Amino acid sequence: MLLKRTLLAGVCACFVLPVWADFSPPSPSTPALLISHNERQKVEASLTSFIEKVWAESPAIKAAKEVIQVALAHEEGADQPLYNPSLVLDAERSQVNTTVIGFNQTLDWGDRRDAQRLVANKQVLMAQSKLQQTKQKVAIETLTALAKYNTAHQMQALGLRRTELMKGFIDTVKQRQFAGDMGALEGALAQVTYSEAIMQQAALDSQLAEAGAALQSVTGLSLAQWPLLPNTLAAPPEQVDEGWLNRLPDLKVLRHRLEMLKARVAVLERETSTTPTVGVRAGREGSEALLGVTLEIPLLVRNDFKAGVRAASYEVRVEQQQYQEAYRRAKARLEGSLARYQNTTRAWQIWLNEGQTAQHEQAYLLEKMWQAGELTATDYLIQAKQNLETQKAATELMGEVWQAAMVWLDASGKTLDWLNMNADTSK
């Protein structure tokens, strides 16, 4: 299970812990921003249950399941004999009364039934692949919206911290003004900075509300608390495995459609063969018994039906080219998404290894120096804003890692593997 590969330990810890630690020096003995193994397992189980609930409520998935039932009904019908026998009754009253009863049966001489059964089977496979495709799509849309919501939530938390800092800053400035240590300019600067923080906070609140509405729209659910994302991501692979493309639901749908069109050509080819009708009759003519056999053979002289075969063959060629085009695009998307995933995770790992500790140390020293009166108000604001901007950039990068991961999971068809789920077409 991909969730268990934890190269990027702590990659999304901001989703499960407060975005701001206190201004205190980091402890080297305590792993930064991690949750326990048991807690991570609970998060993963909760996320899997959430996706299953979204699937259960999704109209798109319900429709895809109904399409499978339609295809299964067609398959059942294709397995039935093509021609039913017909009953013939003939009675004639004249000087010699005649009464005849018989049966006619058209023969499936070219075995069209077997060809149609193959077409129906390919339609079932195509419908099942479409269900898998729809499940993957719904899961990716949900996870993407959830990642955006969590990022917006962390940005809002960061905004709250900014507002708290500016509120503390303005309170300190007022105290120092009262003591005669600061002038009116510092007081005005503090008030403007605090007002700016409040405006930014309002914007972040709106962004969180929009992200929540988008998540509700995608899932069709209205929850008081949305599930957390795991705190670990799989390390991106070194290179593309083209075997992933063969398992990609989008391409599986196209392959089954291509096979279905090929099978339809066989159906049309068999329609060019004759379908004889055999009849058996028995009766009486006056006092004599009658017994007869008839054979009716259609003559394909006015329409040999070969034009339909040629048209269907051309459709197969068109579908083959469309599949090749889809394959090329899917491969390019897979390679591009992998490169993006590798680049964002590399940048995030650098932040975890080098930038995070330095940022915490800077925040701690900055607060310590400000409280000790070693910094002017202007110097403190400049450095405090820079520290906050760094944390904001880290939060945005964290969201970018998740977005890149979602695109890669979609392009590689590994979404359900990552969730430790399957796309069972019977459910």
Image (cartoon, rainbow, N blue to C red):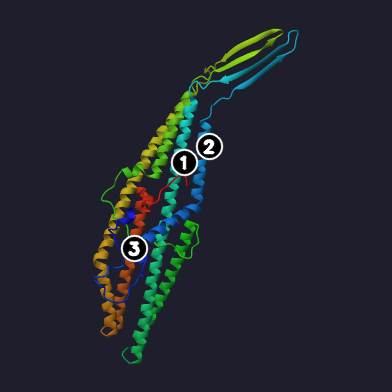
Which numbered marker is on residue 319?
none
Nearest to N terminus: mark 2 or mark 1: 2
Q: Name the residue under label 2.
A: 73
Q: Give neighbour class at mark 2: few <14, some 14-19, many 20+ (Cα, 10 Å).
A: few
User: Residue 191 lies in what quarter of the image?
Assistant: bottom left
Residue 55 locus on image (x, y percent): 47, 52
Task: Tell me the kind of residue under disc 1.
Answer: Ala
Q: Which residue is drawn at the image coordinates 50% and 59% (left, top)?
A: 221
In three-dimensional space, the C-alpha distance between marks 2 and 1, rounded to whole angstroms, equals 12 Å
At label 3, which amino acid type do we have?
Cys
Residue under numbered circle 3: 12
Q: Distance between the residues labelled 1 and 3?
A: 37 Å
In the rendered structure, the answer to whether residue 79 lies left or right of residue 361 reads: right
Where residue 380 appears, as percent x and y from the top left, is 29, 80
Alpha carbon separation for disc pair 3 and 2: 47 Å
Along the viewing direction, whichever of 49 and 368 lies nearer the viewer:
49
Query: Callout 1: 10 Å neighbours few (<14), some, many (20+)?
Result: many
Write down the residue under mark 1: 127
Element under disc 2: helix
Mark found first going from the N terminus, 3 or 2: 3
Q: Nearer the viewer, mark 3 or mark 2?
A: 2
The residue sitting at 42% across, 32% down in the picture is 316
